Amino acid sequence: MTTLSRSHTAEANVLASLDPATGEVVGTVPVTPVAEIPAVVERARAAQAAWAALGLDERAARLKGAIDGLKAAADRIGELISREMGKPIGDARGEANHAANGLAEAIDECVEALRPEVREDDRVRSTLVYDPLGVAVAITPWNFPVLMPQECVLPSLLAGNAVILKPSEETPLCAYEWFKCVAAALPRDVFQIVFGDEAQGKALVAADVDLIAFTGSRAAGKHILSVAGGGLKRVILELGGKDPLVVLPDADIEAAAAFAARNSFRNAGQVCVSTERIYVHRSIAESFEKAVAEKARTLKQGHGVEQGVTLGPMVNRRQKEHVERQIASALKEGARAIAGNEPRPGNFVAPTVLVDVRPDMTIMREETFGPVACIVRYDDVRDAVRWANESPYALGGAVFGKDVDNAERVARQLHSGMVGINQGCGGAKGTPWVGAKQSGYGYHSGRDGHRQFAQVRVITRPLAARIQD
Ligand code: NAD
């Protein structure tokens, strides 16, 4: 979990966002005093009824009014993402443009999910309606500081809730730019923003709100669930991961290694569905390990805004120290580094490939969230599956093998909420983003995910024939 004191400074009620590559102040926002949060919630509640009364189609039309502004701001927002959390500029602009260009389709998908649905049997006709819950909170992390808010806020607003966004203290500026574009299209107080760290997050969870949609660490998620449970508030938690990659003996070694490197080092490993545990069959392990190490060495590390940089810094000093501690403990426990593990200045960590890793090492049990590929060799795929499933995390995963049916049989045995075969874990359009076990509690996206931001009600009437009875 991040705290203001580590990489950000909160003085005189101002939150300064720091560039993790240089330590420079990128900009500031006013901190929302905790004491003001009940008033923010009250304003949201006062605005909610009229927003709900507009109806689903009108709410969608209003939200579509944000598209042009968001498209115009996307490159600027992308630059802020890169400067606030270190993501390479191409990826950062990609995130902001994806949010802007995908907004219309995302709205349509939510509308489709939230329309009333009729079910009939030989007796009655029931209409399922998706009503607002009331005041909803979205608490989001820094690693996808625009996409995460968009995914938690859109279905909530479309369901007729008033929404309060609390973006990460690491990335308040890009989140604010995104927020302003969306809020400009909506009636006053329907969408508000609160700046601060976990103190503001906790105050929102404790406030008189009806839904908490949280994306972040498992530890914070557990805390939120325990507090929200006292008031039986609705909660949707998208939490951390420790994704396995199982490389079968018939895998295309080059493709598997390319995926392993990309998915271990993307966003400097700071992705909830990063590949954090690799199980490779002994018969192909040597070539695979060599290929991953070669790819790690081709990465260009530097300030994310510089052209050509493919690997940025850790978001802050604390995250760097956490990753370095895990690497050091793995080496002490018997692992070998065949790439990386060299000192780097500031918040940078060299992309590191560890081999001779065992499933019981600390680095295979706790979330790393850094640019480290950890490779375990196996002889029997049943061991690989058992090790993969030993974790309390079960977000994403991948299986590589040329016999796709066999790879799918292996994938089916993994506990992960999402598993990709010869590719990453993201599903087709309209599928949920879902963490199993302790990687999630509820989920978002897809028809059923969008519906979790609403209260379903069932209104039942007799069929015409019965009325005449
Ligand atoms: P974090 O849990 O430290 O913080 C996330 C947000 O919650 C921030 O806005 C923070 O201020 C707030 N917060 C922290 N503690 C809180 C508490 N007790 N009550 C209320 N609010 C609180 O996480 P982070 O460091 O910002 O993000 C990294 C984590 O997020 C990783 O574990 C990563 O795997 C996870 N993540 C998961 C997904 C997913 O879809 N499952 C996506 C992105 C990130």
Image (spheres, rainbow, N blue to C red):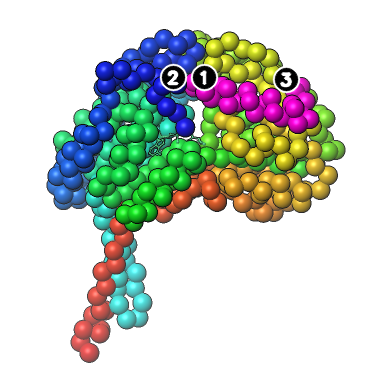
- Percent of width and height locating residue 198: 37, 33
Q: Which residue is mark 1?
A: 317
* Residue in the image at 35% along x and 54% along y: 230
Q: Which residue sits furthest right? A: 283
* Residue in the image at 37% along x and 18% along y: 9
Q: CA distance from mark 1 to mark 3?
A: 22 Å
Q: Amino acid at mark 1?
A: Arg
Task: State the predominant SS element of the stretch in magenta.
Answer: helix
Element marked by disc 2: helix
| Front residue of 292 and 39 | 39
Badge 3 or badge 2: first in the primary sequence: 2
Against 355, residue 343 (above or below) is above
Disc 3 crowd rating (10 Å Cα; few below 14, some 14-19, many 20+) is many
The span picked out in magenta is 314-338
Q: Which residue is mark 2?
A: 7
User: Which quadrant holds the C terminus?
Assistant: bottom left
